Each structure stands twice: as structure tokens, then as C-alpha cells.
């Protein structure tokens, strides 16, 4: 019996038993059905087990399927264009969580940007009163044709374990080393610092200049311009300004004055309150953000005002919200955060935050007022690189009291770019300086994995060059001492090295 016929039968039963004087009761079509009516009509009741079953089936249905006409299978029984059919099938359940499940599944679209208006139009267009309306059974049948297997729905642990094993059997695949080498190179948003998708942080003590660094970085990203000599890939950038909103206009004004142009139109600002632990606000933010962009949340403390940053539970909720924003927008989330009372211990709050980051920048200011930022964490780059910068003050005018209205922009400090570490000993420092001179004068490039335009030097030539500087060492011991110095510089990561055709090469990282 069809769902429509079952509902009609239930209506007749209700009409036959209604008390006298009571107006006719109507059996409402989904989503207003009661659990009893759903059960009688063969519609699954909204339980954790049924929700899990639906989600597992949706894992086998691609949201990239074409819209279609609200059906799943072609005449030959094979899956067709079923996106609209899947949305309608979920709508037919009448579950309170149904719309969220359908939306989250639809947000997995990759062939084109997710369109909330299109989703809403599809969701409300479902009509259960048409002949043979699509139901959840059709969704499950299509999922089975695509490889989904589902046993009886129970709440037993054994059922959960079996589903996990079935999922693993489908998910796990063995790759050879050659398979891995054929994978596309991971893309970045800020080379050696932040990936294009994931979670990052910019943190520092109050007054260190982290918000100014963030604004400069965001503007560079949007234009695809270098940030202190570091390459970026362009995308849309959004700032959620929750701290220092009053000075935001001035920051933009001085940025434009310093750069002699308007702030890029691809940089947007949100100044309304936002709380990461409020699911509805996260939903609204995801809907507003462009796909594949970067969003700066300034600051994490203001975005989670009621949270205990030292609690693993609260930090877990914050991280889940940030990861969801990243996942659903296919972009990068950068939180701007504070250090604790002891700045040497890094970011304030539970250690799970730093562990979850794909990249982090620490902004510092010493007792003399000197500022710098350094790469505190990078999964695909080198940690510890440090960049000196200063805040340049700009006067925008005077207020009603005749005092200057000012703000700042970030500029390199004496044009310093990356400041590399130096060896501790004077002899090692002299050896490194000599090797750098030899590398810069070398005619060899692109050896090993150095990069095609990177100058390289034979290890043997480096040892010879260093040995010639050791005039205070006995002549029969100079080469052995030079070899020790070169080996130490390599071990200390002051020089890069590798073998090519059994010949050692050096280059600067």
C-alpha cells in the first residue's frame, strides 16, 4: 500500500472514532505527522538510530548529482539524477532535524558553489499529495544500488561496531609510494605558513600588533601579493571584528593612505556580535561566507565569551565550530588570540587548541618595543622563522579636543625579512659566512631537491673553502676540522644537504 493510501486509511479510522460534536480531524501530511501516525504509515520515527541510518545512506549519495525531477532511479533500475529526490525524501520524514541533515549533505557540492536559495526552494516545494510521492524508501534503495549496506536498526553496541567495520572496509585503501608521488601537491594560502583549508592562529600579547598584522596579511592574501616576501594565493577574505571595532574605520583609512589605493573589494568585514558556541550563529555565518575563502576571527576570546578556555570540553566545542566553518566553506579559519600571563608559554587556554592548528603565527614585542612575528607552527613549512616589523603611526586629523586621531600600519623593520638563526660559536659563524659566499658565487643550480633556481655547492668544495680559513689550526688537521664544522652546520639546520649520484651538495634553506 502506498504512503498516500495508508494516510487515507488512517483518516477514515480517525473520522469513524471521533467524538460527536468535534469538528473533522485531518491527518496532516509530513512533516506534521505524529510518531504514531508515522509508524502506522511506515514512516521511520526520528530516533538516534534512524538518524544514524539516514546519515550512513547519505554517505553513498553524492550531492554533486544533477538536480533531476525528484526521482532516484532510471527505468533500468540504475541511479539517475537524484539531488532533488534526496532532498524531498528527507523532507517526507517530517523530522525536526531533517532540514539540517539535508542542508549539510547538500553543502558537500563541489562542482559548483552551494546555493542556499536553491536548497530552500527545493525543500519547500515537496508535495506529499501528488500521486506516488517520493519517500525515504527510494533514497535507501538508491543508496543500496550504490553499495550501501544496512542491517536492522538497533541501539546495541554490536550494531555500531558492525557499521564502523563496514565503513572502514569501504574507506581504507592501500597506496604504493608511487601512488603517493602522483598525488597533487598540497595547496597553500600563505606558503610555508597556512594551508588553503584548515585552522590557523595569529596570537600575541595585548599591544603586540597582532590585529594590524592580521589586516595586512588579509589584504595581501586577497590580492595574491607577497606578505613580507612570502607568496600567497588569492581568495576572498572576511574579518569578524569583535575587538577594537571602534578603530576599524581608522585602520582601513590608514591602510589606504599608506598603500595609496583603496582596500581591495574582496576584503569584507562583519561587525555584528558572533559566538562560536552558538550553533545557530555558526549556521548563519557559514551561509554568509564565500566558498574557498579565509575568515579571521578577531578575537577568539570575544567569539567565545562564556567559554572556559582552559576546559578541554569548552575548547573542544570551540574547535569543532571552527573546523565546521572550515569544512563547510572549504576555506581557512584564522583565529586571533592572546598569550597568557607568561608569554613564553604561548597561546592562552587549553593545549588542544595549539595541537589542532595547521599553522600559527606568534606576534611579539620585547621590552625595548621591538616587534616581530614568527612561524610558531607549520605542518608543511619551517617553524621558527622570524620577521622584524614596526607599526607606522598615521595622523588622520584632530578630534573635538584638538588631539590627533591616529592609527597604524605594519611595515618591515629596516627592510628586514627572515632573520635566520646564527651558530653559537664564532668559528662556526665564520665557517657559515664563508660557505654562504661560496654558494652565492657557485655556478651550480637545482641540485637534489633544492629547487631549479637555487644555487648549490659541493660538500667537498665547502670543506676545502672552510679549511683554507683555519689558519690557526695545524695544516694536517685543517681539513678534518673543516669537515666537523660543515657537519655541525648541516646537523643544526643552518645548511640544507642531500646526495645526488653519490655526491654531496649544500644550499641555503
Image (cartoon, rainbow, N blue to C red):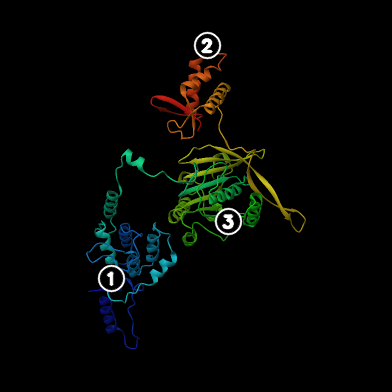
Q: Secondary structure at mark 3?
A: loop
Category of crowding for the residue at label 1, using alpha-carbon neighbours closer than 10 angstroms: few (below 14), some (14–19), many (at least 20)? few
Residue 89, above or below 154? below
In percent of the image, x 48 and y 16: which residue is there? Answer: 480
Please provide percent x and percent y for residue 389: 62, 41
Mark linked to residue 393: none
Instruction: Report the residue that reaches farthest toward the right.
Output: 402
Q: Secondary structure at mark 2?
A: loop
Answer with mark 2 or mark 3, whichever residue precedes in sequence.
Answer: 3
Mark linked to residue 475: 2
Mark linked to residue 242: 3
Distance from disc 1 to disc 2, alpha carbons, whole Å, reads 95 Å
Category of crowding for the residue at label 2, using alpha-carbon neighbours closer than 10 angstroms: few (below 14), some (14–19), many (at least 20)? few
In the image, 376: left or right of 125?
right
Which of labels 2 and 3 is toward the front?
A: 2
Instruction: Report the residue that reaches farthest toward the bottom.
Output: 21
Mark linked to residue 39: 1
Amino acid at each position: 500500500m502506498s504512503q498516500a493510501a495508508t494516510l487515507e486509511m488512517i483518516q477514515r479510522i480517525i473520522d469513524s472514532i471521533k467524538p460527536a460534536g468535534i469538528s473533522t480531524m485531518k491527518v496532516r501530511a509530513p512533516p506534521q505527522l505524529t510518531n504514531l501516525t508515522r509508524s502506522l504509515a511506515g514512516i521511520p520515527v526520528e530516533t538516534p538510530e534512524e538518524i544514524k541510518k539516514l546519515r550512513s545512506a547519505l554517505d553513498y549519495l553524492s550531492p554533486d548529482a544533477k538536480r533531476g525531477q525528484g526521482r532516484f532511479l532510471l527505468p533500468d533500475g540504475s541511479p539517475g539524477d537524484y539531488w532533488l529526490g534526496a532532498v524531498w525524501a528527507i523532507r517526507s520524514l517530517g523530522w525536526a532535524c531533517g532540514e539540517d541533515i539535508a542542508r549539510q549533505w547538500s553543502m558537500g557540492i563541489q562542482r559548483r558553489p552551494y546555493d542556499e536559495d536553491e536548497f530552500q526552494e527545493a525543500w519547500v516545494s515537496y508535495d506529499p499529495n501528488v500521486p506516488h510521492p517520493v519517500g525515504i524508501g527510494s533514497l535507501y534503495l538508491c543508496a543500496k544500488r550504490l553499495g550501501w549496506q544496512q542491517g536492522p536498526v538497533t541501539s546495541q553496541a554490536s550494531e555500531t561496531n558492525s557499521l564502523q567495520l563496514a565503513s572502514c572496509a569501504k574507506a581504507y585503501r592501500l597506496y604504493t609510494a608511487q601512488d603517493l608521488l602522483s598525488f597533487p601537491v598540497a595547496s597553500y594560502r600563505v606558503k610555508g605558513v597556512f594551508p588553503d583549508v584548515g585552522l590557523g592562529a595569529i596570537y600575541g600579547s595585548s599591544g603586540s600588533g597582532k590585529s594590524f598584522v592580521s589586516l595586512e596579511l588579509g589584504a595581501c592574501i586577497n590580492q595574491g601579493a607577497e606578505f613580507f616576501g612570502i607568496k600567497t594565493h588569492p581568495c576572498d577574505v572576511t574579518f569578524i571584528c569583535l575587538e577594537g571595532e571602534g578603530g576599524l574605520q581608522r585602520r582601513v583609512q590608514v591602510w589606504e593612505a599608506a598603500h595609496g589605493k583603496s582596500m581591495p573589494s574582496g576584503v569584507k568585514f562583519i561587525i555584528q556580535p558572533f559566538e562560536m558556541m552558538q550553533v545557530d550563529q555558526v549556521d548563519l555565518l557559514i551561509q554568509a561566507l564565500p566558498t574557498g575563502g579565509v575568515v579571521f576571527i578577531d578575537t577568539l576570546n570575544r567569539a567565545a565569551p562564556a567559554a572556559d578556555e582552559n576546559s578541554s570540553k569548552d575548547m573542544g566545542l570551540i574547535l569543532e565550530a571552527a573546523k565546521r566553518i572550515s569544512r563547510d566553506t572549504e576555506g581557512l579559519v584564522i583565529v586571533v588570540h592572546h598569550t597568557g600571563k607568561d608569554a613564553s608559554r604561548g597561546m592562552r587556554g587549553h593545549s588542544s587548541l595549539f595541537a589542532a592548528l595547521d599553522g600559527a603565527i606568534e606576534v611579539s614585542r620585547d621590552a625595548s618595543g621591538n616587534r616581530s612575528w614568527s612561524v610558531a607552527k607549520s605542518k608543511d613549512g619551517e617553524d621558527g622563522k622570524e620577521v622584524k616589523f614596526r607599526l607606522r603611526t598615521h595622523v588622520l586629523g584632530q578630534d573635538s579636543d584638538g588631539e590627533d586621531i591616529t592609527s597604524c600600519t605594519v611595515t618591515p623593520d629596516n627592510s628586514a625579512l627572515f632573520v635566520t638563526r646564527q651558530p653559537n660559536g664564532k668559528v662556526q659563524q665564520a665557517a657559515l659566512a664563508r660557505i654562504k659566499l661560496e654558494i652565492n658565487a657557485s655556478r651550480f643550480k637545482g641540485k637534489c631537491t633544492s629547487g631549479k633556481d637555487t644555487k648549490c655547492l659541493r660538500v667537498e668544495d665547502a670543506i676545502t673553502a672552510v679549511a683554507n680559513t683555519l689558519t690557526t689550526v695545524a695544516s694536517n688537521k685543517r681539513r678534518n676540522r673543516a669537515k666537523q664544522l660543515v657537519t655541525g652546520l648541516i646537523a643544526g639546520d643552518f645548511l640544507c644537504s642531500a646526495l645526488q649520484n653519490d655526491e654531496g651538495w649544500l644550499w641555503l634553506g
